[in-house]
Image: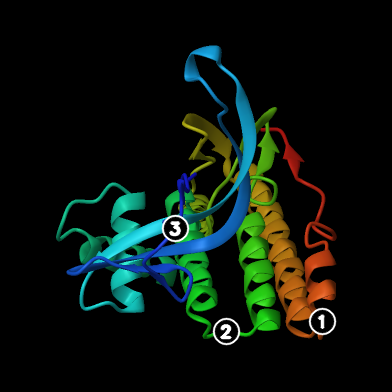
Amino acid sequence: MIAKNYMELPTEGLTRGCMLDEGNAVTVYLDVHEEVRQVPDGNPEEGRVKDETVRVGYAVRCLKPFSEDRLVDAAIQTAFGLRDGEVSRFNADMAMKIADGSDDATVAEYKGFVKWLRLELAKALGTMDALKAAKEQKIAEIDAYDASPAVNGFVLNGSLVWLDKATRVGLMNSTNIAKATGSANTTLWLGGERMVVPCDKAIQLLSALEMYALGCFNVTASHKAAVEAMTTIDEVLAYDYKQGYPERLKMEV
């Protein structure tokens, strides 16, 4: 999980209420909101504190010339601990995995973080109206839930595990080939554990898992469509996107 470290906004020098021009760079404070923090009250040696309301935001700094893409790249570099020059390659690698349908943890985290960044930047710059911003935020939450273990997980022999789309397809193909060539068993790796499973049992497991994944996909798509059709912010904010998902699979091999 990417940690979003929020900083107190400077009291002067901001433009648009969230941008600080630093000469050769620009810092943008995203998701600006008020937060109650405790600060010393009186003599520090006495240990007294009081509550103080401050404005905080997620600070992203990028070198000029400023653009949305440069700001997003700067945030990705910091969030994923990349060195200078590594962002383009990292983005290309993520794009390739997304195109291949990968839903591993890093890809899901990357997709959610980039969507959140672009949404918050659009809100900060005033390029998105309030209803659209609320919808985008809710859909980002739906995507994050869809990629979480609450959806992407099934119980096998008492342990919670998952196989992404590419792995499921590859295992089904290899198991069918093994069966067609006369092999009675195939090998599955789940949760770091090696399992030798009868081909018919593996095909049954993978088929059930594929149907579960399809059911989850349909529920997620219906939630997104419902949000897109809404006409008020209150509807969007109140929408429960965790409902309707298939019951988690439980299997033994």
Q: Nearer the viewer, residue 51 or 5?
A: 51
Label 2 crowd (10 A; few <14 / some 14-19 / many >=20): some
- Circle 1/circle 2 CB separation < 8 Å: no
Report the residue that reaches farthest toward the left: 85
Q: Amino acid at mark 1?
A: Thr
- Picture coordinates of residue 15, whole percent (x, y): 41, 74
Residue positioned 81% across, 55% down in the render = 246
List the residue tagged with mark 2.
128
At 52% from the left and 69% from the top, the residue drawn is: 120
**Residue located beneath label 1 in the image:** 232
Nearest the eye: 17 or 176:
17
The answer to whether any part of residue 236 appears in the image is: yes
Horizontal and vertical percent for residue 235?
A: 84, 74
Q: How is the image coloured?
A: rainbow
Q: Disc 1 or 2, which lies upstream in sequence?
A: 2
Q: In what element is the residue under mark 1?
A: loop
Task: Name the amino acid, label 2.
Answer: Met
Asked if the residue at tag 2 contacts the one at tag 3, i.e. Cβ–Cβ closer than 8 Å, the answer is no
Residue 137 x/y as whole percent: 64, 69
Disc number at residue 11? Answer: 3
Quadrant in which residue 66 is drawn? bottom left
**Mark toward the start of the polypeptide (3 vs 2):** 3
Give left or right: position of 72 versus 236: left
